[in-house]
């Protein structure tokens, strides 16, 4: 398996080529041929109504799932399935090293405090405990959570939980951040703070950000915006 | 404390405290049964070995058949003529009821046997051949509250206690020793003995003790077809009482371990089902199937280790009680051999990992997207 950091093969950081995704033996078609190129440092919003396929597209771009047809390329290299003799990046390795996820429901682990939750992606990778903790602490401090390091998820506000989840998504220094309705469970004040924070991270770290939202006002904060309907990009 | 992979596994196990505690009780009972029963049977074997070693017995001459019980006493001169043999002492061993509750080992020896060298007579004297006299191990004398001069009833006969002795072997400390002729009469074994215990002459120079013993074994087989001479250690491990004790102990404890394994499997299957979404999160964070599987197996192994510690403590307690009960004190030592302790812990880990393997495999197979959607 070659390392995509040293072998750039495409102008795009991430590219979707004619992605199709169907369920139940083709009875349900979630994606009907989506092609999309995303350059490094881009901030892309994907919008659309429920069932339009925007979350499915995000899952395929992030390596959470494999397309029924078509390919996702990261730095020109296929993710998960080799294509035309080009070796694929292992899908687990892709998620671990290059992609970071932020979910609407935060998905923090209840048995771990904020500092420990942020370290979870690094557990079992051979990294040193002290290095893991220092990295997690630095990120939480950067996101304004220094006084809340030892708090458990049920002791944090919704906004704080999402900030912990953002710190967790950044802990392996990913090239792409994928956010699925990151403000969907937040009030307007916290939504604005989280969006501001994501924009700062994107700018400061140069991370490519792909955000799924159904809210056009939120989508307007992105550099670029694609709308989806019935499993296709419609503009 | 800093978070580690193992610490994370333990944290997951301990989240459902009541369920974990109940599972630990189940494993503890299984491992406890293993430690107590296998410890008991090994202790029994060890007591046999001690008995032979203390008396200086090199070989036991017995029948070749598995359930060997009787050898003609008249072969004694044939054994004595074998050049490697110094002494061949006939003996009988049997189990008899001394009270309705207490069964004990009873030995029939000749009054001049070399096996007395392992005994320390605390009170009284050695019995005389042809007399209705017995000697009691101090453990048995204590539990029956008998002293020198008292009488004891055995199989309808009345015997006078003429001596109380101490022995390094639990099999003798709780036993009765009586004249061989009296034992033959009580057991209906006139002219028969259970075995001959043999002391060898010192090996001549140029011949190793092992070679010398082997020559003696070959000489017995050749002089007395149908009989065989077995080294004391083999006799300790392979006599029918020890074999039956081992078989019963392993059989019973394996059933207990199977029940414990089912308990772990159930706990881990429930845990994986409840944490489906969390496993999805771990997979989304880049955890490979192997890493998820390792985590769940580690959790199962942690349950096994903790259950093993509980089980070893329970088993040791049970052995201690058995070592004090009059019914069993004569054949079990209350000390827990290191080997049994380690076997108990290793068994607990193996049971944990085996029982956790299917839930771990199922957890690792979860698709991240499907797992994240799980409610």
Image (spheres, coloured by chain):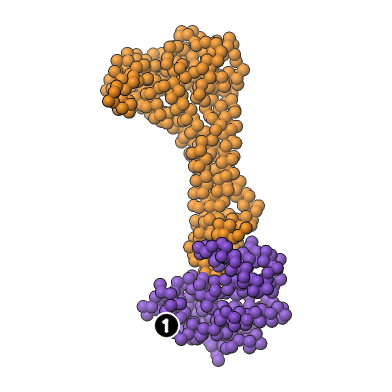
Q: Is residue B361 above or below residue B138?
A: below
In-front residue for pair B310/A134? A134
| Residue at left offset 54%, top offset 74% | A173
Which lettered chain is shown in orange?
B
Density class for disc 1 (Cα within 10 Å; few <14, some 14-19, many ≥20) is few
Residue shown at the point (52%, 51%) measured from the top left: B352
Q: Quadrant of the N terminus of chain A?
A: bottom left
**Residue of label 1:** A9
Residue B14: image x %, image y %?
62, 55
Residue located 52% across and 67% down the image: B287
Question: Where, quadrant-wise, is the C terminus of chain A in this rendering?
Answer: bottom right
Q: Which colour represents chain A?
A: purple
Determine the chain carrying the residue at label 1. A
Q: Position of residue A221 (x, y in %)?
A: 63, 87
**Hey, which quadrant is residue B71 in on the image?**
top left
Can the viewer see residue B187?
no
Front-lying residue, A3 or B357: A3
């Amino acid at each position: 398996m070659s390392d995509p950091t040293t072998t750039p093969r495409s102008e795009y950081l991430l590219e979707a080529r004619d992605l199709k995704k169907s369920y139940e033996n083709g009875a349900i078609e979630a994606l009907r041929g989506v092609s999309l190129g995303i350059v490094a440092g881009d901030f892309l919003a994907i919008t659309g109504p429920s069932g339009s396929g925007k979350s499915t597209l995000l899952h395929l771009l992030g390596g959470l799932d494999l397309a029924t047809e078509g390919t996702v390329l990261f730095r020109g290299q296929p993710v998960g399935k080799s294509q035309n003799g080009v070796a694929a990046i292992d899908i687990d390795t892709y998620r671990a090293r290059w992609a970071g996820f932020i979910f609407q429901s935060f998905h923090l682990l209840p048995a771990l405090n904020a500092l420990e939750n942020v370290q979870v992606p690094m557990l079992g990778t051979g990294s040193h405990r002290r290095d893991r903790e220092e990295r997690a602490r630095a990120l939480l401090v950067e996101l304004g959570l220094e006084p809340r390091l030892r708090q458990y998820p049920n002791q944090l506000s919704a906004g704080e939980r999402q900030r912990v989840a953002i710190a967790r998504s950044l802990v392996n220094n990913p090239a792409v951040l994928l956010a699925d309705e990151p403000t969907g469970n937040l009030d307007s004040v916290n939504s604005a703070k989280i969006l501001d924070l994501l924009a700062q991270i994107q700018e400061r770290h140069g991370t490519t950000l792909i955000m799924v939202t159904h809210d056009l006002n939120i989508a307007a904060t992105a550099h670029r915006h694609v709308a989806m309907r019935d499993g296709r990009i419609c503009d | 404390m800093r978070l580690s992979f193992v610490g994370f596994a333990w944290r997951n196990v301990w989240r459902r405290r009541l369920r974990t505690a109940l599972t630990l009780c189940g494993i503890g009972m299984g491992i406890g049964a293993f430690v107590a029963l296998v410890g008991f049977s090994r202790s029994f074997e060890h007591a046999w070995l001690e008995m032979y070693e203390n008396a200086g017995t090199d070989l036991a001459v017995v029948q070749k058949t598995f359930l060997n019980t009787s050898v003609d006493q008249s072969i004694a001169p044939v054994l004595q003529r074998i050049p490697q043999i110094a002494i061949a002492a006939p003996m009988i061993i049997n189990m008899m009821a001394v009270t309705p509750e207490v069964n004990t080992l009873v030995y029939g020896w000749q009054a001049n046997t070399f096996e007395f060298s392992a005994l320390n007579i605390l009170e009284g004297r050695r019995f005389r051949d042809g007399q209705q006299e017995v000697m009691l191990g101090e453990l048995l004398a204590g539990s029956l509250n008998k002293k020198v001069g008292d009488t004891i009833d055995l199989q309808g006969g009345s015997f006078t206690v003429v001596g109380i002795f101490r022995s390094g072997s639990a099999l003798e400390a709780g036993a009765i020793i009586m004249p061989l002729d009296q034992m033959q009469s009580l057991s209906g074994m006139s002219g028969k003995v259970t075995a001959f215990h043999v002391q060898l002459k010192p090996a001549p120079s140029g011949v190793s003790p092992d070679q010398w013993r082997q020559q003696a074994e070959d000489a017995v087989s050749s002089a007395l077809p149908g009989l065989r001479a077995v080294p004391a250690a083999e006799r300790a491990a392979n006599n029918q009482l020890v074999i039956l004790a081992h078989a019963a102990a392993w059989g019973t404890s394996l059933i207990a371990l199977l029940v414990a394994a089912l308990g772990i499997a159930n706990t881990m299957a429930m845990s994986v089902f409840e944490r489906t979404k969390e496993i999805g999160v771990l997979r989304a964070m880049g955890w490979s199937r192997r890493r998820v599987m390792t985590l769940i197996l580690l959790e199962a192994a942690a349950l096994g280790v903790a259950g093993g510690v509980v089980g070893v403590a329970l088993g040791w307690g049970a052995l201690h009680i058995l070592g004090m009960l009059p019914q069993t004190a004569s054949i079990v030592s209350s000390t827990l051999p290191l080997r049994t302790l380690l076997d108990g812990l290793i068994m607990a880990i193996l049971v944990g990992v085996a029982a956790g393997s299917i839930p771990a495999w199922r957890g690792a197979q979860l698709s991240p997207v499907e797992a994240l959607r799980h409610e």
